Image: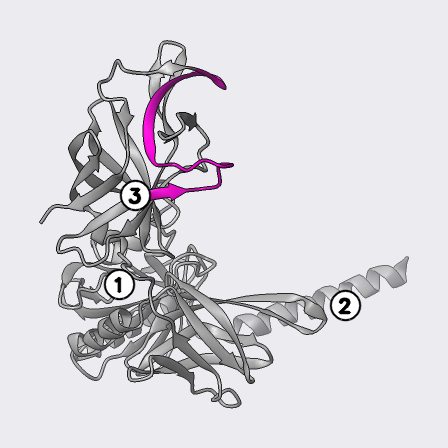
Amino acid sequence: MKKIIYTFFVFSILLSSCVQDVDDVFDEPSSVRVEKALAEYQALLKSAEYGWAMEYYPSSTQAYGGYLFTMKFKDGDQVTVSTDAFEEAEKEVTSLYSLKKDIGPTLNFDTYNELFHHFSDPDIIDGGGKGKGYEGDYEFIFRSHTDNEIILRGKKTNNVIKMTRLTEPPMTLLDKTVKLSKETFTTTYTANIGGKTFIVPMEDHVFLFSYETEGEKTESVSGPYIFTATGIKFYEPIEVMGKTLENFTWDSATKTFTCTDQGATDVKLTANELPEGYMKYKDFLGAWDFVYAGGRIPVTLEEDSQTSFLMVGFNPNYKLLVNYDKSAGGIRIMSQKVGNTGNNEVWLCAWDATTGNLFKNTALGVASKPRANAEDIIIDLESYGVWADHEVNSLIVWEMKGNEYVGEFKKWGTSRYTGPLSMIKNK
């Protein structure tokens, strides 16, 4: 027993000695050290004549790729922000920022900035939709720095965010990245790696590599990227078919990204042509005429989400959901519920007017096909989906009681939209 007590006594002395040694490492309290760090970071942020370029990645999975922000920090806790995210490099918005003490020094963007907070605003319809948005950061923890580089970590996403001192006016850099963004836009690339070629889809600043390995297994790797002055850079190095990839330069003549990383300079990504008549999401927004055999209806396509619109004006009692197909650059109007009547539902149904058959299947509808050689923007709406021997050439409004087809619903006005169907964009 005495031996145990003695051992415990000696251990206690040693432990207290160790604790004392740790305390002696710093000459100042932690609060003082943090204050000094904040002052140092404040001076560093303001010292950049042209400001800083931030490589910003929203979402903890980098699912939406990365975007470049330029930031000029000024007296009065003001910061002027520009970005290549919206293809408007010349736009600048000034708001407030602060440096605070948290689990260390932090950089915070305190007041709403329509450019920067777009990616952290949960009320926008983009990204994951309302309630989520892009789920990006607006508060960052300082991790390290040199005179020309600051490394941050997002408090929410834990993403590594790099800031680099600009050596030229912000617009000079952003003009280059915006030009690249427009020039390189397409839906798929052809990868050439180790003599093998395969298609690589590209969406939201993310390349999606999917290829067969030995044993016919399929390997999938995503490469979220940000635009640089000369090409792109992945969020972090990725391995594809034994090659480590991170940095690429763009050749506008061949429409090809070429890897510049050691051991992978033979890797190329060549842009494929967009489908004929391809239209971007924003091209569909605005006023159209919906044309059918019985008439012409002025309608408006309004923004709903990244993958859909709301068609307003088709009928005063409801708005139609119109899907956007980014890979094809077109739209689809599918069978859908549009309202209720008593205890029953009202549906806009896929209709084969030639045979008289209709179906409320939400996988059936009409899809856009650009009309060739048209002076105006005209899209024909043609059959979409598999429906035995029928085709969807028209749309009809029908009352449904569960899966029972009650009858044609005429109480809300026009119920038959007989083909051929088309839409004409208003000038």
Q: Nearer the viewer, residue 306 or 84?
A: 306
Disc 2 target residue:
10
Marker disc for residue 85: 1
| Quarter the N terminus occupies | bottom right
Above or below, 16 against 60 in this view is: below
Residue at 32% from the left image edge and 16% from the top image edge: 409
Q: Amino acid at mark 1?
A: Ala
Residue 396 highlighted magenta (yes or no): yes
Q: Are marks 2 and 3 in contact (CB under 8 Å)?
A: no
The x, y position of residue 202, in whole percent, is 41, 65
User: Which-is-in-front pick, marks 2 and 3?
Assistant: 3
Residue at 36% from the left image edge and 65% from the top image edge: 66
In the structure shown, which secondary structural element does the residue marked by tag 1 occupy? loop
> Magenta residues, as a range?
382-405
The x, y position of residue 408, in whole percent, is 34, 16
Marker disc for residue 381: 3
Query: Can the viewer see residue 122?
Result: no
Above or below, 171 against 396 in this view is: below
Instruction: Residue at the far left: name it.
Output: 427
Q: Amino acid at mark 2?
A: Val
The x, y position of residue 112, in whole percent, is 21, 51
For this view, does 138 lie left or right of residue 242? left
Above or below, 104 against 252 in this view is: above
In the structure shown, which secondary structural element does the residue marked by tag 2 occupy? helix
Q: Tell me which numbered mark, 3 or 1, is placed earlier along the sequence.
A: 1
Alpha carbon separation for disc pair 3 and 1 = 32 Å
Q: Residues within 10 Å of mark 3 (few under 14, many from 20)?
A: many
Q: Residues within 10 Å of mark 2 (few under 14, many from 20)?
A: few
Q: Nearer the viewer, residue 78 or 407?
A: 407
Q: Tell me which numbered mark, 2 or 1, is placed earlier along the sequence.
A: 2
